[in-house]
Image: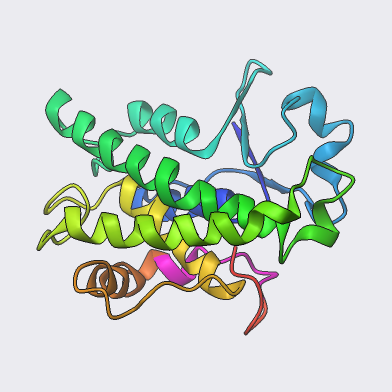
Amino acid sequence: MKLLDAMSPAPRCLRMYLLEKGITLPTEQIDVFTGENRQAPYLAHNPAGQTPALLLDDGSCIAESIAVMEYLEELHPEPPLVGHTREERAVTRQWQRRAELNVTENIHNAYHYAEGLKRFEGRIPVAPEAAAGLKHVAQDRIRWLDGMMGARTFLAGERFTIADIWLYVWLDFGASVGQDFDRALPHVGPWFERVAARASADASLHPACKPGGVRG
């Protein structure tokens, strides 16, 4: 297997997962800033043009970081970052979907349409007029998530999972591009600091990340 990696939040999620699992994969870097992921030969592997992607030994490719994590989890079930039981796995997926659909996808698209507009216009459809609204929704949904999280140590309870990885990386990215969240939130604030203190958090940053720059 070979990982097609990049300096971007979704690939960082996968890198953080690999560090937590103690998995090392041969890796090739894809330059998303020059649009290498939107050109051949990358598109021959992943026609969606997104990173990361995992090339399998038979030549096939699995894309989308969560899908790659789920695939690797079946190969390397310990330590469990999805869950030991079907109930645990369902709860992990529930929280990951809540975070992605309500919070992180809005941060992502708001960045495309505002801070990252010059980079993305011409590559993907952009809607600059939507950016402010998406940022507002993301912040509202972070507060909503804070209320649902309650006093849990992690999103799925006492278990650290891929849901925590996903939300942490995107909130950290958001803070680096002018979309920080309210650090005084009673549950998400301390949760963020707990995850940031894990060795995998800073270690998952791409080597090209610069102090004060975009964190991916």
Quadrant of the image containing the N terminus: top right
**Picture quadrant of residue 50:** top right
Q: Nearer the viewer, residue 84 or 147?
A: 147
Q: Nearer the viewer, residue 70 or 164?
A: 164
Q: Nearer the viewer, residue 123 or 5?
A: 123
Q: Residue at x 43, y 27 (%)?
A: 71
Relative horizontal placement of residue 44, taking residue 191 as reference (left or right): right
| Residue 9 screen position, x and y as percent | 57, 55
The region drawn magenta spans 201-209
| Magenta stretch, overall SS | loop
Is 73 situated above or below 207?
above
Is 26 situated above or below 116?
above
**Picture quadrant of residue 47:** top right
Q: Residue at x 52, y 46 (%)?
A: 105
| Residue 215 screen position, x and y as percent | 59, 69
Relative horizontal placement of residue 150, taking residue 71 as reference (left or right): left
| Residue 189 screen position, x and y as percent | 28, 74
Q: Residue at x 55, y 43 (%)?
A: 25
Relative horizontal placement of residue 103, taking residue 41 as reference (left or right): left
| Residue 141 screen position, x and y as percent | 36, 55
